[in-house]
Image (cartoon, grey):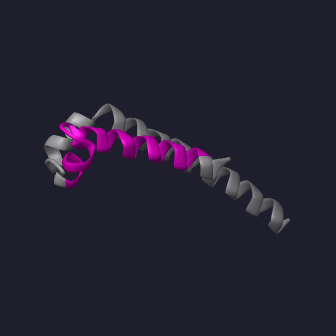
């Protein structure tokens, strides 16, 4: 009985993590302009990703969040 409860709890946890992680990833991709204005430009991202690298950094972080979430859930 305890194993069944644990299994159901893990399914619920994975569903919740998937929803939250996917929403965070999409939010980072969609609102990268606002995130840059909120936190400022990142000199390291600008140096290695070129002009506009901070915006690209937020998009990459969003993509990594989505991929990491899907990877953990499945």
Number of marks: 0
Query: What percent of the width, then of the height, locates residue 6?
Result: 74, 63
Most common secondary structure along the magenta stretch: helix
Q: Nearer the viewer, residue 38 or 64?
A: 64
Rendering quarter of residue 57: top left
Q: Is residue 61 left or right of residue 39?
A: right
Task: Point out the residue furthest to the top here.
Answer: 30
Residue 21 lies in the magenta stretch: no
Instruction: Examine the structure image and report whether residue 58 is included in the region drawn in magenta.
Output: yes
Side of 9 where 25 appears, left or right: left
Q: Residue at x 59, y 44 (%)?
A: 70
> Where residue 53 sits: x, y (%)?
24, 41
- Residue plotted at (18% across, 51% down): 42
The foreground one among 60 and 48 is 48
Q: Position of residue 1 (x, y in %)?
A: 86, 65
Work out whether residue 2 or residue 25 is closer to the camera in this orientation and state it: 25
Q: Position of residue 18 (x, y in %)?
A: 56, 45
Q: Residue furthest bottom?
A: 2
Q: Magenta span covers which residues? A: 44-70
**Residue at image location 61% in from the left, 52% down from the top:** 72
**Residue under the image location 82 percent in, 65 percent down:** 3
- Where 37 sits versus 30, above or below? below
């Amino acid at each position: 009985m305890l194993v069944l409860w644990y299994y159901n709890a893990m399914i619920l946890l994975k569903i919740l993590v998937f929803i939250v992680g996917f929403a965070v990833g999409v939010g980072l991709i969609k609102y990268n302009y606002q995130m840059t204005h909120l936190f400022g430009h990142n000199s390291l991202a600008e140096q290695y990703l070129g002009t506009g690298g901070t915006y690209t950094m937020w998009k990459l972080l969003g993509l990594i969040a989505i991929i990491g979430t899907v990877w953990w859930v499945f």
